[in-house]
Amino acid sequence: MNGVVKMPNDKRKMTRYTRKVGRMGNSLGVSLPKRLAERLEVSQGDEIEFIENDHGEVVLKKVRQSKLPENVRPEVLEAFFDVFEEDEGILEDLRDR
């Protein structure tokens, strides 16, 4: 079965993928099947977003990154956001003073 189940009786074209949840460091993770990764046009290092609807269903979408200016390196911007997340409480306290 290879983790893929075709749903022939459903009117919508639908493919189901199954994966086991595994440990990734202190978190839980799920791998993307190769065919799904190709359809989403994602590769290692890309970001995906999980969108949950009112029915508890989750949709995966590739996060579409806007192009950075040439003088901004992505790793510097990522480090900035990491620091901002870590120190968000401190920054909010400074803002409220």
Image (cartoon, rainbow, N blue to C red):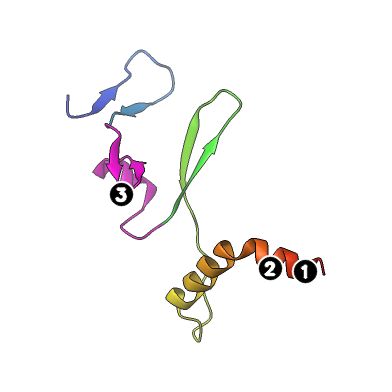
* Disc 2 and disc 1 in contact, CB within 8 angstroms: yes
Helix, strand or loop under label 3: loop
3D distance between C-alphas at marks 2 and 1: 6 Å
Q: Which residues are magenta?
A: 20-46
- The answer to whether any part of residue 32 appears in the image is no
Q: Nearer the viewer, residue 19 or 4?
A: 19
The relative height of residue 29 versus residue 10 in the rendered view (above or below) is: below
Residue annotated with mark 2: 91
- Examine the image and state in which quarter residue 92 appears: bottom right
Mark 2 Cα shell of 10 Å, populated few (<14), some (14-19), many (≥20): few
3D distance between C-alphas at marks 3 and 2: 29 Å
Task: Give the residue at x 54% y 39%.
Answer: 51
Identity, as a three-letter code, of the amino acid under mark 3: Gly
Task: Give the residue at x 58% y 30%.
Answer: 53
Q: Nearer the viewer, residue 59 or 11?
A: 59
- The image position of residue 81, as x and y in percent, is 54, 67
- The image position of residue 33, as x and y in percent, is 26, 40
Residue annotated with mark 1: 95
Task: Give the residue at x 43% y 17%.
Answer: 11
In screen coordinates, is 89 left or right of 53? right
Residue that protrudes farthest toward the bottom in the picture: 71
In screen coordinates, is 27 left or right of 82? left
Mark 1 vs mark 3: which is more N-terminal? Answer: 3
